[in-house]
Image (tube, rainbow, N blue to C red):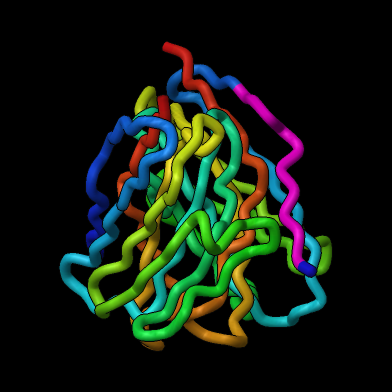
Amino acid sequence: GAVVSQHPSRVICKSGTSVKIECRSLDFQATTMFWYRQFPKKSLMLMATSNEGSKATYEQGVEKDKFLINHASLTLSTLTVTSAHPEDSSFYICSARGGWERSYEQYFGPGTRLTVT
Amino acid sequence: AQTVTQSQPEMSVQEAETVTLSCTYDTSESNYYLFWYKQPPSRQMILVIRQEAYKQQNATENRFSVNFQKAAKSFSLKISDSQLGDTAMYFCAFMRVIGGATNKLIFGTGTLLAVQP
């Protein structure tokens, strides 16, 4: 199956700083990428959907100025957590979907654990 | 709006035995996809099985099979000959067909399955 990578896998940052998480589709072109947040033993919460070259669509309650999403190419999307605070500590997962012939297939990255101190 | 319900937060099964995880959903759509994803302790999301709503035949993938009851809006997962490696959180998910690649997955709350030796 298709591979999606995330970098970094773990990151610790100080309160007030910003941190960027990268999501890459390694062997296919991802027309759509999704960003999720997951708390321990909980389900995935969709934060936003991004399409290459256009602005991300954020879910209700997600602060777009705090969680900046950029989908600059068909293989790369980034999530930047700006002015991070301890409550932003979480597990962030991206996923990617290809073109119409794979429109139902969604491939997940391995996740990034963010700890804000 | 679509919803997905998993009523079993935790389940346990003995190795080599069979276990069934339940999932119900609510939608007014006639065509959609249903999925079961597995999230082991590594937290990598893995697709277990997929069912297209227009197909009457239940999907099967090796030891994993589903019981898809469209009228009842039920989509249970049966794991046969359970193995220790099946220990994971299992998520049921729904996705509309209309809208293509931008359609988002609607996840249930998950069932934590523990396979006991």
Residue A9: x %, y % from top left = 26, 39
Residue B57 makes an appearance in the image: no
**Residue at 43%, 38% in the rendered image:** A16
Q: Is residue B111 left or right of residue A14?
A: right
Residue B61: x %, y % from top left = 41, 54
Farthest residue, direction top:
B117
> Along the line of sight, which residue is nearer the eye, B67 or A66?
A66
Farthest residue, direction left:
A27
Based on the displayed image, in which of its 4 quarters is residue A23 positioned? Answer: bottom left
Residue A5: x %, y % from top left = 23, 54
> Would you say residue B8 sits in the magenta stretch?
yes
Farthest residue, direction front:
A16
> Along the line of sight, which residue is nearer the eye, B32 or A26?
A26
> Would you say residue A53 sits in the magenta stretch?
no
Residue B55 makes an appearance in the image: yes
**Residue at 41%, 76% in the rendered image:** A32
**Residue at 45%, 45% in the rendered image:** A83
Residue A40: x %, y % from top left = 53, 29
Q: Which residues are magenta?
A: B2-11
**Residue at 45%, 41% in the rendered image:** A84
* Residue B14 versus residue B70 in the image, above or below: above
